[in-house]
């Protein structure tokens, strides 16, 4: 059962513009959400997280928005840079932090 | 570097052979996870440990798979009688279990298994 879904396998954006990556989830028990970035031949690296008590969290060029009623979160990257080209995974878990459920990823390509 | 380290980075084996992967987590982390990732998919949970106790196993983890974390430090993941369907990237991650606040996973670079 795919509890976390990323319906866009790829996204191409021009350098300097905004990148918006989307993620949907089905389990209303999820209360902690994360975004990871993965380069080829490397493990995923943590990017930014958000707790369900918030609807927005910002860290530099990266902002995550959470819409609990729609069970939807998004990652905004502004401005996008070529070095941001990678696969982005969203992940979710519950208060117990027992395991994290991951989406299938969105490959972002930022064109110079 | 005190991140999560995995060994070997790449393993090629013939079907039916046994393979073992090792993971050294971040030293102060008490939780250790194994995930598996195949092409075009996100990481899938296999199992996790809190200290030396294996607290949960996915139904993906058949009886050919066994994981250990002796003394709550490093962990090993063994796959017996490998099958071609076992070909994947095996990711180890660690985290610090907190009573509250963030508890994100820190991943190693993965061990890629190719079963011929």
Image: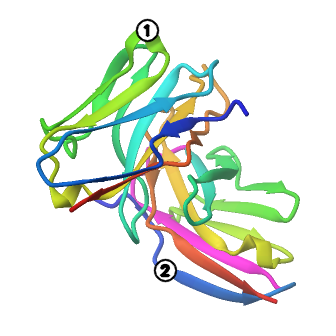
The residue under label 2 is A9
- Give the magenta part as a residue range: A17-31
Is A63 located above or below residue A100 in the figure?
below
Q: Which mark is residue B53?
A: none
User: What residue is at 61 percent from the left and 46 percent from the top?
Assistant: A52
Q: Nearer the viewer, residue B104 or B19?
A: B19
In the image, taking residue A68 as reference, residue B63 lies left or right, namely: left
Q: Position of residue B104 (x, y in %)?
A: 61, 39
In reply to whether residue B4 is colored magenta, the answer given is no
In reply to whether residue A28 is colored magenta, the answer given is yes
Q: Nearer the viewer, mark 1 or mark 2?
A: 1
Q: Position of residue B97 (x, y in %)?
A: 56, 23
The Cα–Cα distance between marks 1 and 2, rounded to whole angstroms, is: 41 Å
Q: Nearer the viewer, residue A101 or B16?
A: B16
Q: Which of A33 and B27 is in front in this view?
A: B27
The residue under label 1 is B71
User: What residue is at 48 percent from the left and 43 percent from the top?
Assistant: A93
Q: Which chain carries label 1?
A: B
């Amino acid at each position: 059962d795919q509890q976390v879904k990323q319906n866009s396998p790829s996204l191409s954006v021009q350098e300097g513009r905004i990148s918006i990556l989307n993620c949907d989830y089905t389990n209303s028990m999820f209360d902690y959400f994360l975004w990871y970035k993965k380069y080829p031949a490397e493990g995923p690296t943590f990017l930014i997280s958000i707790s369900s008590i918030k609807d927005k969290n910002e860290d530099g060029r990266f902002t995550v928005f959470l819409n609990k009623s729609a069970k939807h979160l998004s990652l905004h990257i502004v401005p996008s840079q070529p070095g941001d080209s990678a696969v982005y995974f969203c992940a979710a878990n519950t208060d117990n932090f027992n395991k994290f459920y991951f989406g299938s990823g969105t490959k972002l390509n930022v064109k110079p | 570097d005190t991140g999560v380290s995995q060994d070997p980075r790449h393993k090629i084996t013939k079907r039916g052979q046994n393979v073992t992967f090792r993971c050294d987590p971040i030293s102060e982390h008490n939780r250790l996870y194994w995930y598996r990732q195949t092409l075009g998919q996100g990481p899938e949970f296999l199992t996790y440990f809190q200290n030396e106790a294996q607290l949960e196993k996915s139904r993906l983890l058949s009886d050919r798979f066994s994981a250990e974390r002796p003394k709550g430090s490093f962990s090993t993941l063994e796959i017996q009688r490998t099958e071609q369907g076992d070909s994947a990237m095996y990711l180890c991650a660690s985290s610090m279990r907190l009573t509250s606040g963030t508890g994100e996973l820190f991943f190693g670079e993965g061990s890629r298994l190719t079963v011929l």
